[in-house]
Image (tube, coloured by chain):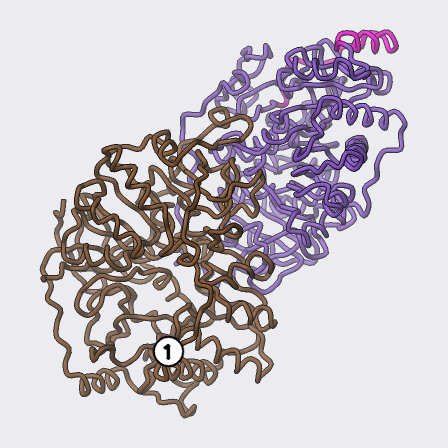
Chain colours: A brown, B purple
Amino acid sequence: MKEYTLVKNAAGRMVPDKVNGENVIPYQGVGKYKPSQRKYSRSIPSCADYPEDGNKQVGSLKEALIKSGLKDGMTISTHHHFRNGDLLANQIFDIAKELGIKDLRWFPSASFPCHEHLIQYLEDGTISHIEGSMNGPLGRFASVGKMKKMAVLRSHGGRYQSVQDGEVHIDIAVIGASSADSFGNANGVYGKSASGLLGFALADSEYADRVIVVTDNMVPFPCVPWQIQGNNVDFTVEMEQVGIPEKIISGTTQITSSPDRLLLAELTARFCEAAGIIQPGFSFQAGAGGTSLAVGEYFRKIMREKGIKARFARGGSNKYLVSMLEEGLVDYILDGQTFDLDGVRSMAENKGHVWTSPFTSYNYHSKGNFAGIVDVVILGATEIDVNFNGNVVTHSDGYLLHGIGGWQNCLFSKTVIIPVPLFRDRIPVIRDEVTTLCGPGELIDVIVTERGIAINPLRTDLIEATRNSGLPIRTIQELKEEAEQICGIPEKPNLGEEVIAVIKWVDGTIIDAVRRVIV
Amino acid sequence: MKEYTLVKNAAGRMVPDKVNGENVIPYQGVGKYKPSQRKYSRSIPSCADYPEDGNKQVGSLKEALIKSGLKDGMTISTHHHFRNGDLLANQIFDIAKELGIKDLRWFPSASFPCHEHLIQYLEDGTISHIEGSMNGPLGRFASVGKMKKMAVLRSHGGRYQSVQDGEVHIDIAVIGASSADSFGNANGVYGKSASGLLGFALADSEYADRVIVVTDNMVPFPCVPWQIQGNNVDFTVEMEQVGIPEKIISGTTQITSSPDRLLLAELTARFCEAAGIIQPGFSFQAGAGGTSLAVGEYFRKIMREKGIKARFARGGSNKYLVSMLEEGLVDYILDGQTFDLDGVRSMAENKGHVWTSPFTSYNYHSKGNFAGIVDVVILGATEIDVNFNGNVVTHSDGYLLHGIGGWQNCLFSKTVIIPVPLFRDRIPVIRDEVTTLCGPGELIDVIVTERGIAINPLRTDLIEATRNSGLPIRTIQELKEEAEQICGIPEKPNLGEEVIAVIKWVDGTIIDAVRRVIV
């Protein structure tokens, strides 16, 4: 099944022309590939086939899976709003194993270390392969060529796109929810397993043949807000516990205390100030990592000093962002996932804290999405190359250990800034060429390191605006050379020829392939 | 184009096999017709074809229509949330006329007397015909056979179903909104033309080729709540005024003061009490007409006395329902349209006041909708027959003067009660046979008149529960005869053979046909 021919895509990368037996399209450049087909359309259901009183509850997840027609070769989807506290995905495949089902494709919006349990099923053929971001053990398993089929990694927006476009047909979607009613309306806002929202399951609910909602908090109809609409749901299940609360969301999010990372954050914020990005009505997105949180705090300081209010902040939300909303420094948080208890509370209480989905925020195959409206986005990367290309999925040793998340989608923001240390564990971050290409350099504007800031030559406006800022502006080549002077020229990873995973671009084309690590 | 053969459907009605050249399916009975095709799917758009910064605003409605490719024979849709205060639909066809466009199909969710302006365009061929509820002058125009093509009337849910299923392909949807941003996110909650919500435009936004959002209140991105999602929108337009506020919503809603109608309301409420329907956690839907409002007030009285709280009330909302929500007598209002200022205010302020759409509430071609979850619904009718069949679109003289609204969809409620006077203007309401069949008698449970209550023989449970209630329970035959003793046997309307309109059932089949009135 790993049969393919390698072709060179528009980024110069050699990528397979077939993935698991299906033809795929090589990357053609930003905005170049135009879909010519129609959206996937589901067969038309009839209310006549559903309970008259709206009660779709069945006795167990197993019963729901059987009634959904679980069989060999199906695609089963889950969402990752429960993050490392997810208790559902493992159960689904335990049931599949018990029933003797084989060759399932697991289509999670992301996997986490808690899903290491599933390696046994990848080994025994219950699961043929995973299409979805793999964080940790599963990525390591795939990296050394042990997964039977090729992995496919997509951005959050790309996952929505792939389902909408019919690239991935979901047979059964299992949607865990911290609140639901027996009709299938569900949300992540209330209940002991609250995760804030369920946006990553939206496509699944809309396009899967069968949709199962599982909750540990069944409430009388109506369960509102209905982030997942019962009108798309086939069966509902109540169980004791769908997730481990303290692993779903952290009680507290903490800003980095590392002086190096604080410096990155400060330089990033100062750059934004100097470039005139921080102005009344602006918008920003910073992640929930320690450095990003610190950037937000520097923003807050600047905004307070200058009396500037942002129109919106794009979340991942956390207590820092929530306090900016509550302080009136931002009008809205447009939130894709909540990272701590304050985020969940705020989403429940505050009309300015809006839950979004990969459709509204990130789907490239729509009539616009709001990633492009965000003035500045602060992202991370495992590697950046001298052409500003970015890698977020593999380490420099070739191991595929991270998902793409919303990273690719966010590149369409008006200004993309990536603060990274010049080296990690004495391995330079800025390279001649990224090990895996996830995002083309033309969309990445600024690299901030502790030893200088490199601006993409395409952004003459930013170069001009910060010329006399006193900031340590340097070329990316200079930064790379400085890192190499300190750490030496990095070694190439020891990779085989075999493609173990492909990286999809936001339009469904193949931007790069990941090779097997030779151990 | 009025070529067809009449066939007898499962209700015994003679209906055309073709409507405006397209084959249609005769009604087959409740829950009998099962769709075998797939949902309509729109061609896949790409963000690459939309403005990078999300700003889709163009200078005028005319410009937006031209850019949308307006041409002969297209289908143009609008919603009716602005009710009789709508200023948009007339403008659209003024522009079409100016551009010399012909043969447009207008696909409103309903039309109002304010749209009488469009009769000139029906006459000169700018508009070929209307598919949508026609209230007033347009209905009168169509009734006498003046419309060039056949009208098609659908319920709110049926309209969603027809678009979803691809029965009606919308070329251009024009969505008026009291608030919007330049990206196309829109709502009806805020702004001078606030109508509460925009649910009737949801299908249009999801399935039309081109979507234009027009507002008189352009706000900076993000316009939230985004009842219409900008990701589905092609162009946005700002204009001075999209509607006449006092005609969009009334400043005050008033309960009937007519002793006859108050009696109907009281009998209805007493029946519900006797039948055990008013119990903790129950749900109800009463409309915004004077009698229905009075039923709600009687419910309130009973609920207060007995300490009963409802789980939800299905709106059309108004100040009475809002005060029940605020008093804590209902947990939620699930609202399809707001009828007064209190409704709009409540929807903006109260998390328990939930906006819905014909998808969540009424679409029969889904995996359930919530109409069936409602315990009791109070509806109106122009005629009821001795088999409990109901008519809501024509008067007994044959004139087509009303739309179906949500009436057909609501028939799936657990108990359907229709309070009607025994006669109106000395014309009996209860007949041997309804002039036009809109809802089959098997779904209509109770007819309440000022001279007695008739229970559908199918509902032995209700007959049993109210046997010793002291309520004036009678047979429907008795009620019909009493009316005829007072008013005489009603004359038959003077109708021609020609079918001027068809009535769709909730599943898209043809339940009846409306004949031309001979004048």
Magenta range is B475-502
- In the image, B439 versus B415, the foreground residue is B415
- In the image, B82 versus A332, the foreground residue is A332
- Residue type at mark 1 is Arg
Q: Is residue A507 left or right of residue B403?
A: left
**Residue annotated with mark 1:** A459
The percent coordinates of residue A233 (x first, y second) are 46, 37
Q: Residue at x 81, y 32 (%)?
A: B298
**Image height check: is A92 above or below A368?**
above
Per the image, label 1 sits on a secondary structure element best described as: loop
Task: Name the quadrant of the N terminus of chain B.
Answer: top right
- Chain letter for mark 1, please: A
Q: Is residue A301 in sight in this rendering?
A: yes
Q: Is residue B323 left or right of residue A225?
A: right
The percent coordinates of residue B342 (x first, y second) are 76, 49
Q: Residue B492 lies in magenta, yes or no?
A: yes
Q: Is residue B141 in sight in this rendering?
A: no
Q: Residue A205 lies in magenta, yes or no?
A: no
